[in-house]
Amino acid sequence: MKGHVFRLLTLILITQTSLFAQSENMAFIKGNRYIPLYGRDSTVVEVKDFEMDIYPITNAQFQDFVAKYPKWQKSNALKLFTDKSYLSNWENDFELKSSEKPDSPVTYVSWFAAKAYCECQGKRLPTVDEWEYVAMADENIRDARIKPDYNKQILAWYEAPRTNENSIGQHPKNVWGIYDLHGLVWEWTLDFNSVLITGESRKDVDKDSNLFCGSAAVNATDLMNYAAFMRYAIRGSLKAKYSMKNLGFRCVKDINK
Amino acid sequence: MKPLKSIIILVLLTLTFSSCNSNKNNQETVLFQCPMHCESDKTYTDAGNCPICKMDLQSLEPSTSKIENTIGISEESIFNLTSDWNTEEGEQIQLRDLKGKTLVMVMIYTSCKAACPRLVADMRNIEAKIPDDKMDQLNFALISIDPETDTPERLKAFAIENYMDEPQWTFLQGTESGVREFANVLAVKYKQISPIDFSHSNIISVFNPQGELMHQQEGLGVDNNETIETILQLIH
């Protein structure tokens, strides 16, 4: 009997690292239907159950990643997948500049790099609908969008400078157990290029300058969505090879039933 | 019996989670080469001595750029994408298999009733202005943004229906993530509106035979002179 228990314990110890690596630091998100700012025809979208990283990916985590996958190192990354500012707050292929903190969210990463990171963890980037679904929760309820406080807090962050240099996990977690969806950096989404606000062509999107202008957004009937407006506007203006100082990412995982 | 079962499951899980494609590929492609380049760029798969100068062979860094260089494409080439695609003829290809011809590409879906027929017409108008004897230097590729519906069979039927079944036309079905990635390379935006409808940007892109983006035409039924000029410059 003793030997049996011992064997089991050893086994657990051996496999623990790789097993926990999967759902470690991820939270279960119960799917549901909801109405995002821009859903299909601005109606209800359905989000399935999934797991989401509790924190955004940090500089330190991305350092581990590039050490393992040289093709995403600063000097090796292809121009097709990155622009000039890719990892521009890094000293070289492996080290951060001395001003940067290992536990700050990684930024200056392109969509391609973020996607590759998640795929190498057996995960993927969240869709816009998934991200917005989790992000509408506050500390107490799953849909806090009608609470004035919730919106005020997010907007206060949008005004705060250089939040990308803060450490992860400093703000309270939301009801799902997820940190920092608001308050640190914007985050890449898998289908950010699905943000077409009007019409069918990119021309139309470009012409929709109202969307990129904060004052126009204030006039929107639905003031509660001002913050969401900003996010959709940012997404609509991004290209996948862009890197930005205040744009990071986190990963999600489908639940296999 | 029970512990054995759980052991097997655990081992299997461990294997599944610890593997990641790109890493594996890197490890498999370590090549060795003579530091003096006695046999120019000849490479060996095993370490050893150069048969001419007898020096130890040096291992080549298995970095992506080196691999890419060996097949002669630049960093900005779309042939760096490694996603798999099915053609309307049922062949499985990667984009780099299209290397060597000037590429004219557009993203469509076959059940589309609004913009796509016009985009397809735009493609045909471009094709019509290319001299017949140059046609073998060109590849017109239509990529489906609806890989679930647009199977190779369906794409083939669409090709026949639209008189686009000649060799210069290629229709591609990808994976959802491959299509998303490719659209991002072209800066094409699209979104599924309903199970049968997508909205998408209307962009025709021209690539040179090395897969570098040369020109993009945006909009429907627009003046295609510039596009045709770019193509004619690329073929001789």
Image: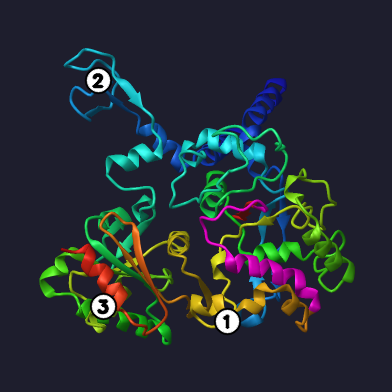
- Please tell me in which quadrant of the rendered image residue B131 appears: bottom left
Which image quarter is the C terminus of chain A in? bottom right
The chief SS type of the magenta part is helix
Asked whether the residues under the numbered discs 3 and 2 touch, taking CB atoms below 8 Å apart as contact, a structural biologist would say no
Residue at label 2?
Answer: B36
- Determine the chain carrying the residue at label 1: A
Q: Is residue A91 above or below residue A198?
A: above
Q: CA distance from mark 3 to mark 2?
A: 50 Å
- Residue A28: % across, % down: 72, 54
Quadrant into which the N terminus of chain A falls: top right
3 or 2: tag closer to the N-terminus: 2
Question: Where does the magenta region start and end?
Answer: A223-247
Where is A40 relative to B37, above or below?
A: below
Q: CA distance from mark 3 to mark 1?
A: 28 Å
Q: Is residue A243 magenta?
A: yes
Circle 3 is placed at which residue position? B126
Q: Nearer the viewer, residue B198 or A30?
A: B198
Please tell me whether residue B147 is drawn above or below residue B159 in the rendered image.
above
Chain ID at mark 2: B
Give a yes or no on whether discs 1 and 2 share a subunit.
no
> Residue at point 31% right, 79% down?
B224
Q: Quadrant of residue B204?
A: bottom left
* Helix, strand or loop at mark 3: helix
Callout 1 amino acid = Thr
Q: Local crowd at mark 1 within 10 Å, few (<14), some, or many (≥20)?
A: some
* Label 2 packing within 10 angstroms: few (<14), some (14-19), many (20+): some
Label 2 secondary element:
loop
Q: CA distance from mark 1 to mark 2?
A: 60 Å
Judge the density around disc 3: few (<14), some (14-19), many (≥20) Cα neighbours within 10 Å.
Answer: some
Residue A29 in view (yes/no)? yes
- Amino acid type, callout 2: Met
